Amino acid sequence: MLQLDPRLIADLVGKDLIAFGTGGIGKMLIPYLAQEPDIKLHGVTNSRVTTVDAGTFLDTRLPIRSLDTWAKLIPEATILLCVIRKNEASAWSACEAAGFKKIIIAPFYLIEMLQDLYNPGRMPTAHPMLRMMCLANELRDIHKASFAEFKGCHRGQTVAVVATGPTLNYYTQVKGIPHIGTNASFLKEGMSLDYYFIRHYEREWCDKLKEYNFIKFFARNEWTEQHHDYDRFPEYLIEENNGRRFFTGEPNNELYEDITYYPLMGGYSIIFQALQFAVFTRPKRILLIGCDCSYNGHFDGTPLVSSVTVLLPAERFVPQWIEAYKKLKLFTEQHYPDMEIISVNPVGLKGMFRDMYTESYLEEHPEINRTECEIFDEIEL
């Protein structure tokens, strides 16, 4: 059997693994992993196995047991999801329900390589190293075209970055400063944007975008490991909006000073790509608007639902956001100490940046001691 390139399995070495999935992907991937001496693969499971001993998997001699059984035998093991994309969310939830804390998804490059071997008649997929080189070239060209002209363009100004949390309803737009919006923020009554970032193909929003005249940035989701085909922006949408492209490093949260050469930070939210762009324009002050960082839904009353739950259960992605904000704070303090970040009507971010409250928000939240609050005054801006 083919020996896998050690570089392709480096992320799996050193972990006590249990493979979840006995379908097509599992049948391709698990036999190869089972033969690798550096891979500690203890066994196999899926959501349908309910017994302590359900035999062995193919000719690997790996035992097949229920999730509950594995949770009792090796509770600290890492579950390796070997399932198709549309089943990742349900598989992840099943593993968490059984008590597993460490869950990862089978690397897409391994799956693609094995698909080439099992289906020699399919269109060949580029070698992973070639794909990496193509990605680097594409990222450089696209980011230069999308971002180069904006480097330092708002130096000395105040810039607002607009998310879609409920506190957006308590913000009256400050005139004369650039606003960078995300997701459905452009639909907020009275909101006028200068820039706009979108990462997921939400048909309801995208159908309306061409009616609005602001600079629009669309994510290149198809290069990310978490990409789903239905989440790819169609080319006509980019064309009719004179759209610009960008890449993220999802799930990596790394930040770089020059975004013309590097992907924007991940953070499991579009707000972080908008914020890194804002930093790139070098303002003296960034206002965080509607960045509630809470479970309270959105300004328009819709619940907090996100495709990020494919990778992170709902109760865990808000802490992930908070960690990303902390990283952004450290980055700006180290590289741009002359830049101030103000959180307007903070909820989950209270105490992280400079906190300011609007009068309308305080009026509807009498539990907040207004004598201890700094009032948001646009005159200062």
Image (cartoon, rainbow, N blue to C red):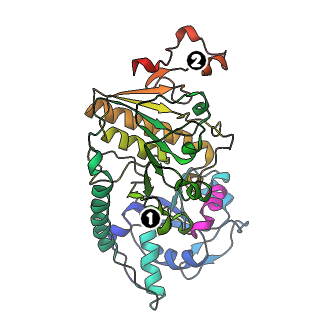
**Position of 272 relative to 14 (above/below):** above
Q: Which residue is mark 2?
A: 359
Give x and y (percent) for residue 252.
40, 51
Compute the Cα span from label 1 to label 2. Answer: 42 Å
Is residue 88 inside the magenta stretch?
Answer: yes
Give x and y (percent) for residue 301.
69, 40
Give x and y (percent) for residue 228.
54, 65
Q: Which residue is mark 1?
A: 239
| Mark nearer the N terminus (1 vs 2) | 1
Mark toward the viewer: 1 or 2: 1
Question: 334 and 246: which one is in front?
Answer: 246
- The image quarter containing residue 144 is bottom left
Decide if residue 159 is on the left or right side of residue 52. left
**Which image quadrant: the C terminus?**
top left
Is residue 34 inside the magenta stretch?
Answer: no
Question: 65 and 334: which one is in front?
Answer: 334
Question: 250 and 11: which one is in front?
Answer: 250
Where disc 1 sits, the SS reads helix
Residue drawn at the location 34% of the way across and 33% of the way down: 330
- The image quarter containing residue 7 is bottom left
Question: 6 and 105: which one is in front?
Answer: 105
Where disc 2 sits, the SS reads helix
Q: Amino acid at mark 1?
A: Glu
Residue neighbourhood size for the residue with mark 2, other residues' Cα within 10 Å, grouped as few (<14), some (14–19), many (≥20): some
Q: Which residues are magenta?
A: 82-95
Residue drawn at the location 61% of the way across and 20% of the way down: 360
- Numbered circles on residues, count: 2
Residue drawn at the location 61% of the way across and 15% of the way down: 368
